[in-house]
Image (spheres, rainbow, N blue to C red):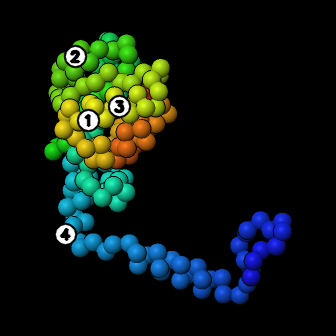
Amino acid sequence: MTAGLGHNQGPTFDPGQSWRAHCWARARSDLLPRLPIEVVRLRVKRAKEIGLDYKTYASVRATTGHDIVAFLFSTNALRLLRDSDRMIEADARKLADTQKLGKLLAVQPPLECARVARQLAGQDVLIDATMAAPGLNKSWRETRKVLVDFLQDTCHSPDRVLLIGDTPIEREWVGAARLAGFVSAATYFPGDMSTQRL
């Protein structure tokens, strides 16, 4: 039966609604892969190594079909806004403790790539490669080219790189470069945002 003119396509009140809902839920769960417990354990361990909660890690894997091989941080995500800034100690420790993962950095102006990398190294945060972040004056196509060229230069496939960012503009980089996904700085570094930098 088709809905008539003016019908808002809301839920039907025909008999059997709960049975149809059950069938839909069952069919959906049957489509999801059933992973062996050993695989789940390895993925939980991997999520912990790179500092992500399992749900986020599993979601990225399910979306891309690949493991995450690198994070692309923005200086905004690291809460570095001025030349004199240092990372919050707990955030720096978390980033220094991540294992078996590339650490890339998009440096927002007016900060300078080499200087920021040196400051982070002083906090035991080693960055594999830095780039000048695409500016606000860049078109979508130019932004894509800047990001993809940088990832190619660092030998990283975009769909295996997860962006840790802090602004809506940075979130757009995911679509532009076809990155694995976006995680907000507040999610990745869940400490008190008002904590003083050291």
* Residue underneath mark 3: 145
* Residue underneath mark 2: 114
User: Disc 3 versus disc 4: distance between alpha carbons?
Assistant: 40 Å
Dot 2 amino acid type = Ala
Please tell me whether mark 1 sits on a helix, a strand or a loop: helix
* Residue underneath mark 4: 38
Q: Residue at position x 27%, y 72% from top?
A: 35
Q: Which mark is residue 151?
A: 1
Whether tag 3 and tag 4 are in contact, CB under 8 A, the answer is no
Q: In which quarter of the image is residue 8?
A: bottom right
Q: Is residue 191 left or right of residue 36?
A: right
Please tell me whether mark 3 sits on a helix, a strand or a loop: helix
> Visible in this render: residue 187?
no
* Among the two numbered marks 1 and 4 on one chain, the one whose residue lies closer to the N terminus: 4
Q: Is residue 163 left or right of residue 67?
A: right
Dot 1 amino acid type = Leu
Q: Quadrant of residue 32?
A: bottom left
Residue 17, percent across and down?
A: 66, 82
From what the image shows, is residue 68 above or below residue 168? below
Mark 1 or 4, closer to the camera: 1
* Among the two numbered marks 1 and 3 on one chain, the one whose residue lies closer to the N terminus: 3
The one nearer the camera, 81 or 156, is: 156
